Amino acid sequence: MSPVKSSANNAHGGEIELKLSASPEVLAKLKRPAQWTSLLQSVQGRAVSEKLRSVYYDTKSLDLRAKGIALRLRHHDTHSIQTVKTAGKRDEIAPPREEYEARLDNGESAPDPQLVSNKHLRRQLRHVAAKARLSPVFETAVQRTTRALRTRDGDEIELAIDIGEIRGENGHAPIAEMELELKSGTRAALYKLARQLVRTYPLRLRLQSKAARGYALIVGETISAVKAGPLTLDGDKSTEIAFETILRHCLQHFLANEPAVIETQSPQGVHQMRVALRRLRSAFKLFDDFCQGDEAKRLEHEAKVLSRRLGELRDLDVFLSDTIKHARQTIVDHDAALTALAKAAEQARHQAWDKIIATLNTPRFMTFALDLALFIETRQWREALSSDASLIEKPLKLHVRVMLTQTFKKISKLGRELKSLDEDSRHVLRKRLKKLRYATDFFSSLFNEKAARSYSRKLEKLQDEFGLLNDIATAGTLMPFIMRKARASLRGDLRESDLEKALQAVEQFNEDRRNKILTAMLRQWRSFSSAQPYWEH
């Protein structure tokens, strides 16, 4: 028994790989060397194909999973390879992960924590194994094809195409993916190569590792929407480092919800993707000094276009789950007409879903995600800072205090006239509040935690009232469109005049709600505006 490799000791500080999923048919094409020669002009050696069976170990309580550790044995004819991997950073789409390997002779069929070369990980594994038995929890069986690649810039990347399945007590899940592992060079090389690939083939970025998918299988986790996780910034670091960290956070949040939208058509997945794009656009505005270059402006525009498309579906979801649902509970007459309006809205929602799925399956969508990853990785914003390089090292906390104060002043100026604001001005105020909310999500870790949390709750309650008011305004703009669809589907005794009367009843219902919301909004404004800003504590 002996350690054979410790990837954590390489130049990158760990294994760095990018995963892309596709159909087995597409992956079969990508096994051919001609595909790579046209992309890279350099394919090194012949492809190697082999069957791999890997067994993952944990305790009955899944203690290793709780610690972000994956332990597996990969079986070969004469020996096994024990591998220990860490989860890597949550906000990376190609995170450096520690990886430690050791060879076990054929007669040894159980993992041995003592073989882990990293002292801290070895101690963790021994501690877990001393309390509970490590036993197989799931396994993977794949046909793997590997090939060595070299980019035009000299970066060396190992391509691995895996087709097979994950097997557990609760069933199995297919594996059809490609891994691009950086052997030498820059992480940007992975993004550039992946960008070339998604422009040519129907590929999707996959954030989950095989280990994460295996654990999800055995515990019965289903694909669902993902909220943005907590973000911790270091006030002693530079403003540039904070900007980079926030962008990574937004990109990860955005991509983490793509499976919920594509595979389960989750309305909450659409909402969270939209929130991620809003947060991203807010970051561009909050750090506008870093976003004066052409690429930053293009990415912000792409985020806006995609957000608008997601918004069309979200508006129909809210119309059905809020406006029509509550109207039918309140309005005693016009039931048949309201049912017709609901069916028309449902039909429009199905069409909107088809458009969203089509959009997310276009090269433009994945190219946007990889362009953003490349923008972050290469710090392309520096190209627009050449005239004022001091911005890169500007202290973060000072920048944040000034920015938050300026945003709050603009909010206060409009908010003082809230009772008499017209709809357009209220919309401007709503957007400024949203900007402050996302800024608070980004920067609250720099200040007193209790004060920031209390302030955020007041801000959230005020925002909720603005959101409800916006939903009513959106319903008003949707009604003519829904009305046209309902007219085209009139059946039986239902007449156009019945639809008109139902529409008027819904409009009156929304007007009554609007007046109540305005009253609640003024109350929440007084609570929010009287609170001391947390950045002044």
Image (spheres, helix red, strand yellow):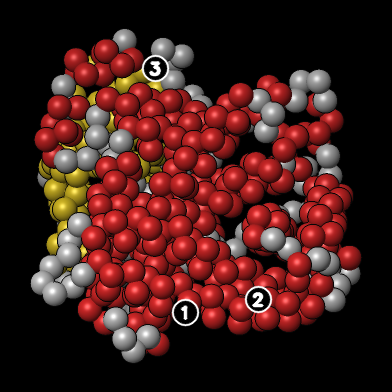
CA separation in Å, label 1 and label 2:
15 Å
Give the mark nearer the N terminus: 3 vs 2. 3
**Is 169 located above or below residue 290 in the figure?**
below
Q: Amino acid at mark 1?
A: Phe
**Is 333 located above or below residue 461 in the figure?**
below
Badge 1 is on which residue? 509
Between 148 and 294, the residue placed more toward the observer is 294
Instruction: Identify which residue is drawn at 73% across, 81% down.
Output: 523
Q: Position of residue 344 (x, y in %)?
A: 25, 63
Instruction: Identify which residue is drawn at 36% across, 78% down.
Output: 325
Mark 3 or mark 2, which is nearer to you? 2
Q: Residues within 10 Å of mark 2 (few under 14, many from 20)?
A: some
Q: Residues within 10 Å of mark 1 (few under 14, many from 20)?
A: some
Compared across the picture, whether 67 is left or right of 23 comes to right
Badge 2 is on which residue? 518
Q: Amino acid at mark 2?
A: Leu
Compared across the picture, whether 246 is left or right of 372 comes to right
Badge 3 is on which residue? 151
Q: Position of residue 513 (x, y in %)?
A: 54, 79
Q: Is residue 524 among what the camera can see? A: no
Instruction: Identify which residue is drawn at 38% across, 38% down.
Output: 365
User: SS at mark 3?
Assistant: loop
